Amino acid sequence: MTLNERELFEEFELSKRPCAKPESLFERFDSNGLGESEQHYVGKYVDSYMQEKWELWQKAKAKAVPDTHMVLPKVADKKMINAGYEAHDGFYTNGQVQDVYQAMVKASESGAEG
């Protein structure tokens, strides 16, 4: 799970508690003050309820999006179109890249994947 994923989780949780302070809500264990037998707590949330929510978030994400897939928008944004265009040394026009992307989305929605 990426750092970005943890940031998304914390942002989501904080949005439900506008008066909460992130430093207390998302406090995590570090190795200071933990004995050798307690090192498995390092990086986990001090609040066991928050830790459980984080673990459930990770499980839901893993089930929703396998490592072999990724979630992309139905309509490619400008950055995506430009990357597709540049990947083919300008062989396609930006409009053609968008057409190819839309065809892939349509094929996926029709159950044509895999």
Image (cartoon, rainbow, N blue to C red):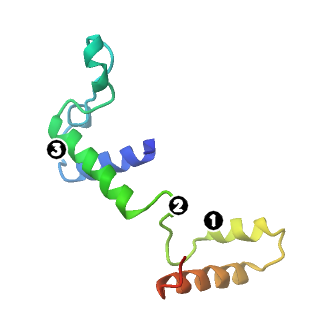
SS category of the residue bearing label 2: loop
Residue 68 badge: 2
Query: Could you tell me if residue 35 is visible in this image?
Result: yes
Mark 1: which amino acid? Lys
Marks 3 & 1, CB-CB < 8 Å contact: no
- Residue at which label 3 appears: 19
The CA distance from mark 2 to mark 1 is 22 Å
- Residue 46's quadrant in the figure? top left
Across and down, in percent, residue 47 comes to 17, 34
Using residue 2 as the reference point, say whether residue 99 is left or right of it.
right
- Asked if residue 87 is positioned above or below residue 61 in the image, the reply reads below
Q: Earlier in the sequence, mark 2 or mark 3?
A: 3
Q: Residue at x 21, y 31 (%)?
A: 24
Across and down, in percent, residue 22 comes to 25, 37
Observer-side mark, 2 or 3, equals: 2
Compare residues 43 and 7 and report the one nearer the observer: 43
- Residue at which label 1 appears: 79
Compare residues 21 and 90 and report the one nearer the observer: 90
Q: Residue at x 25, y 18 (%)?
A: 38
SS category of the residue bearing label 3: loop
User: For the C terminus, which image quadrant?
Assistant: bottom right
